[in-house]
Image: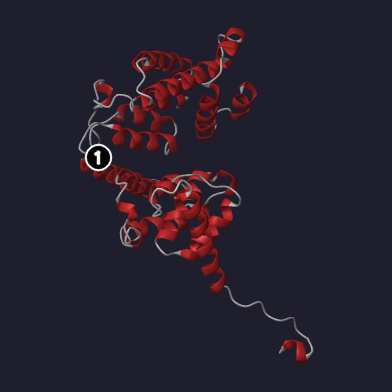
Amino acid sequence: MRNLLAETGSNWPLRSSRTQVLGIVAASTNVMDAWLAEEPDSHDARVMLARVAVERAMRAHRLRHGAAWGLEYRARRAALVAADGEPQDPVPWLCRLSLAQIDTRQAWREHREEAAEPMLPTGPWGLFHQVEQRDPGNREAYHRMMHFLLARQVLEAAALAEVMDFGRWGASKVHDGSPLLLLPIYAMAELCRRRAAYPRSAVWRLQWSQEPMLGYTLRAFHLWFRNTDPVLRSVTDLSHLACALWAAHKLAEASEVFDALGPYATREPWASVHDYGSRPDAPAVLFLRARTESAAAAAKRRPPTPLPVGLPPQIAR
């Protein structure tokens, strides 16, 4: 962990994703105690301590454990210490932004600031902009904001509408090649997941094949998928794009994304949009169905392979 973060340096997007994954794994261990005992002045160690503390607080919150608020306070303190160590590092601010999901009543003042965009609700916008100043277009920051909007204790219909507004707003302000072009797709998948009965209807795919959703999906395909180094594509983003293209009946395009996925897949968004009732294997069944249908449609569109020049007539026939 120490060597990997040292090699990452100030590549902030990569540092954000690596510390997030490492924090999830390290949260079940005492590795941070060992690292800090050896290198108490290491900034990377303090950042990872904050990541681990946030992950533990988030787990306790999801389980509605009584220790959640104590862990949240500890994580907040760890993030503040890490932020003092390197003012340009966005990760400590991402840690604080993550903790906003625990504050469902927006009790902290920093979690109910006014948004610059009139159509968006109050939230931890100050923390969000601190990340944006250090790493513009940070993928995790936008997704943390979306999760915060979903976690608030507000009416379900209002929350989902605000999430959709946020997804459209985020996708409209980023550059070509940014994975944030997929934000409306994530928002729509959340809508399907929250309205569990809706995807079961026979017409659930219509919303994906109509405007404005179709336009957002195709924009993500052309401006992100075809303009991004394959090494930088995440399996989660590819899975969401493949699902959206398939649901919108853009099967040839979906086949390209499935090819890019190769042997990999994620449970979401397939678990949120399937129409197979309570089958435990429903996400896998829908994924395989979508991949097969997309590959078959793409094969039909390919021109026939021309015969080599000079073959005998009987073989050519």
As displayed, is residue 316 above or below residue 9? below
Residue at screen point 46% across, 58% down: 222
Task: Write the residue at 51% across / 25% down.
Answer: 23
Q: Is residue 126 above or below residue 178?
A: above
Give the residue type that dot 1 points to.
Ala
Q: Residue at x 51, y 33 (%)?
A: 17
Q: Position of residue 63 (x, y in %)?
A: 38, 25
- Return the residue at label 1: 159
Q: Position of residue 127 (x, y in %)?
A: 34, 27
Q: Which residue occupies the foreground of this view, 22 or 60?
A: 60
Task: Describe the element under mark 1 as helix, strand or loop.
Answer: helix
Q: Quadrant of the N terminus?
A: top right
Would you identify the image quadrant in which residue 193 lies? Answer: top left
The answer to which quarter of the image holds residue 38 is top right
Q: Residue furthest bottom?
A: 313
* Apparent side of residue 234 relative to residue 218 in the rendered image (left or right): right
